[in-house]
Image (cartoon, helix red, strand yellow):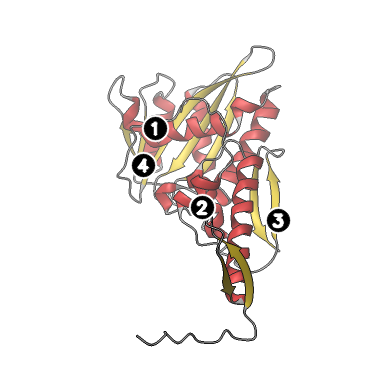
Amino acid sequence: MPPRAHSAPGPDHQAFLAVRPSGESFTIRRSPAGIDRLTGRLRERRLIHEMSVANPLWGAPRIHGELLKLGIDVGQTTVDKYMARRRRPPSQGWWTFLRNHADGIASMDLFIVPTISFRLLYGLLILQHNRRELLWTGVTAHPTAEWIACQLTEAYGWRQAPRYLIRDRDRVYGHAVLSRLRAMGIRDRPIAPRSPWQNGCAERLIGSIRRDCLDHVVVFGERHLRHLLMAYQNYYNEARTHLSLEKDAPIPRAVHAIGQTLAVPVLGGLHHQYVRK
């Protein structure tokens, strides 16, 4: 059989001498395009590792969402493979939550935040279900029906009110709240007793606020908590990617694939937003 003909390498190809375990040497040739692809993959792996180190609260889905916004098309399994490994606490998230949500549905809920002086403050959130947008946050030391009614008016002052509002059966949602909902054309939908999973979107958001922010800071007072919640609201709506939104933010983020990658600290460096400049 005649010897097989081999095409001559191009002038831009680079040759490398390798040795097999048997001692036999052979030549590896690579083109500049292949070397550029390899260099690009190494840069992506290094960026994945840096993101996971700088944001210890992030998992592979969150980092994958940030990479997609930077125009880097890698798989989520690849992100998980090259993340920095560390011991993680057990998950504190809700496994059961509302999977079907539509336009015209909103939910609200109250949550308790202790301060450095062991004083209890109450936070109120209002969530739009269509894009998981955190529409409103409020803080008070003494929640009343009149105060919640005022918060609803301020939240939807210049916005279209939802058709339905999901809430729990806390007694604080008294006559003033129900009257305000009727005046705004919103149909009240309280959940069943002892069934927080029926308001799963709001409950899950409260869990995210605690895991992403409040579990890592010491709250000094009402003004400090209000500042933290406003900063987190901006981060949550404009930067944080979500699984339910196909790794997009509630306020859609554009994909930027050109430019240098910069890390913008959020909430005092607790999180970072990655942008191109």
Judge whether residue 82 can be spotted in this image: yes
The reply to whether dot 2 and dot 1 touch (C-beta < 8 Å) is no
Give the residue type that dot 2 points to: Gly
Splitting the image into 4 quarters, where does residue 194 fall? top left
The reply to whether dot 3 and dot 2 touch (C-beta < 8 Å) is no
**With 177 as the anchor, is 225 left or right in this view?**
right
Q: Helix or strand or loop: what does disc 2 sit on?
A: helix
Residue linked to disc 2:
65
Give the Cα distance between marks 3 and 1.
Answer: 49 Å
Q: Residues within 10 Å of mark 1 (few under 14, many from 20)?
A: few
**Quadrant that contains the C terminus:** bottom right
Disc nearer the start of the sequence (3/2): 2
Dot label at residue 196: none
**With 151 as the anchor, is 178 left or right in this view?**
left
Q: Residues within 10 Å of mark 2 (few under 14, many from 20)?
A: many
Give the residue type that dot 4 points to: Ile
Residue 27 point in image, percent of width and height: 58, 71
**Quadrant that contains the N terminus:** bottom left
Give the Cα distance between marks 2 and 1.
Answer: 42 Å
The reply to whether dot 4 and dot 3 touch (C-beta < 8 Å) is no
- Residue placed furthest toward the top: 118
Residue linked to disc 4:
186
Q: Residues within 10 Å of mark 3 (few under 14, many from 20)?
A: few
Give the residue type that dot 3 points to: Leu
Give the residue type that dot 1 points to: Ser
Q: Residues within 10 Å of mark 4 (few under 14, many from 20)?
A: some
How many numbered discs?
4
Dot label at residue 179: 1
Residue 237 point in image, percent of width and height: 54, 48
Give the Cα distance between marks 3 and 2.
Answer: 16 Å
